[in-house]
Amino acid sequence: MCGIVGAVATGPVNQLIYDSLLLLQHRGQDASGISTSHDQFFSMYKAHGLVRDVFRTRNMRSLPGNSGLGQVRYPTAGSSDSVDEAQPFYVNAPFGIMFVHNGNLTNWRQLREELFSIDRRHINTNSDSEVLLNVFAHELQQAAQGRSLDDDAVYRAVAAVHARCRGAYAVIAQIAGFGMVAFRDPHGIRPLCIGTHETERGTEWMMASESVALTGCGFSRLRDVEPGEAIIIDLDRNMRSRQCAENPVLTPCVFEYVYFARPDSLMDGVSIYDARLQMGEYLGDNVARSLRLGEIDVVMPIPDSARPSAMQLASRLDLNYREGFIKNRYIGRTFIMPGQAVRKKSVRQKLSAIDMEFRGKNVLLVDDSIVRGTTSRQIVEMARSAGANKVFFASAAPAVRYPNVYGIDMPTQSELIAHGRDVEQVAHEIGADGLVYQNLNDLEQSIRDLNPAMSQFESSCFSGCYVTGDIDEGYLQALQLSRGQRTPAGAMSPTHED
């Protein structure tokens, strides 16, 4: 999972991109990068670490220009420790392209072979993003046919990318001497939105993974980029767009709404905060059917993303709501931390229990999801150590039983606590006196309630149904084998631990 941004302004853009990346930092903490364009020259700086740690004054001064790109990254399967795999990426042929990508290609290995053997393009890393960039560059070359680049050629190139690439991709690219291009895969699995800012010198544009990056920088959200759509912002800051996919269908990743996106973002017409409130409504009904409400003294959230669901659940069931865990804001998200030992240590550093809120009470803990179960088990232990009499657990998401192959580097099936276990067995594994999962239909309906136009979702980690149609048991087995062979340094296999 990554956060990307592109901006075209009337003045220097480096600070604007920096500020927007700070607002997207929750989407990746492994590496940060910014590129800018000035007099048809590109400048770039990227490194491992948080935005605030990567960029110093000297780095910002080396990024002149009124348009540019940025990315915050956490690595997905197959990535390495090398800063070479941080973004933006660049190719100088045929036109000179800077490129940022959020998502994951499922056929990137096949594409890499085609690029080498047929298209005669060399790939320097194991990043699927570099593969996608080179596919785009090759198709631009084919579409332009030796002439100067125009809109039609760009749209034809994006259509060719849609025809060749499988998986999830939200892309922003900057083409030397032409302008900025953004496009989204035909399913719209990963989010991308566009906004404007009116100034005395004209309209400024920003595109980003989440609307909070726009509004937090003074831009007005215009709309989401449609699945399959390509948007062009030329050198004169004029915007044009065209649908480039044959049968686009909005199928957003449901996990964005459950966990990844900030609650103050608006995504595909849906308020993330309101969606999480709705999840609490439906989860409350399921809790009422599954547990004896008379045994529950208090509802407590696991901070932070589960808080809206927990509040709404408590309200719906007329139960007391209390904050029992305090979060240390200076510890990073363990979802993207390498190594089980690091995760285990980080949970106790990140959360501390308020003993008086637990002592002698039957507590219902609400979390957004359970993936490995490692954190859930430790949190249940912390609640008991603080004096809880009974500890029940509710997940605002259904049981995670399958890997996500579209940009969330979830564990393989054997590492998922719900794989091969029923609800009672998972409850026993995490040490809870009772466990309630959200129903998948209810989860999807909680989002659809806020945007009835949404007909389907990418919910593969819950259902095992992969919308791109190219994932089978053989693919998942190969994925598990490849992960088993990875070194610990590159094995960024996250569990949910917010």
Image (cartoon, rainbow, N blue to C red):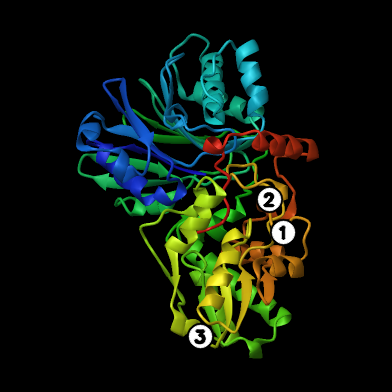
Coordinates of residue 410 in the picture (x, y in percent) = 62, 47
Residue holding disc 1: 418
Going from N to C along the chain, the mark reached first, 2 or 3, is 3
Name the kind of residue labelled 3 in the image. Answer: Arg
The residue at 22%/36% (across/down) is 11
Label 1 and label 2: CA atoms lie apart by 9 Å
Name the kind of residue labelled 2 in the image. Answer: Glu
The residue at 27%/46% (across/down) is 198
Of 65 and 262, nearer the camera is 262
> So how many labels did they put on this image?
3
Coordinates of residue 79 in the picture (x, y in percent) = 54, 33
Coordinates of residue 208 in the picture (x, y in percent) = 42, 44
84 up-or-down from 278: above or below: above
Q: Is residue 118 left or right of residue 59?
A: right
Is residue 368 visible in this depiction of the protein?
no
Q: Nearer the viewer, mark 2 or mark 3?
A: 3
Circles 3 and 1 in contact, beta carbons < 8 Å: no
Q: Is residue 200 left or right of residue 35?
A: left
Of 484 and 23, nearer the camera is 484
428 up-or-down from 349: above or below: below
Residue holding disc 2: 415
Name the kind of residue labelled 1 in the image. Answer: Ala
Name the secondary structure under disc 2. Answer: helix
Name the secondary structure under disc 1. Answer: loop
Q: Nearer the viewer, mark 1 or mark 2?
A: 2
The residue at 45%/80% (across/down) is 355
Residue holding disc 3: 359
Label 2 and label 3: CA atoms lie apart by 33 Å
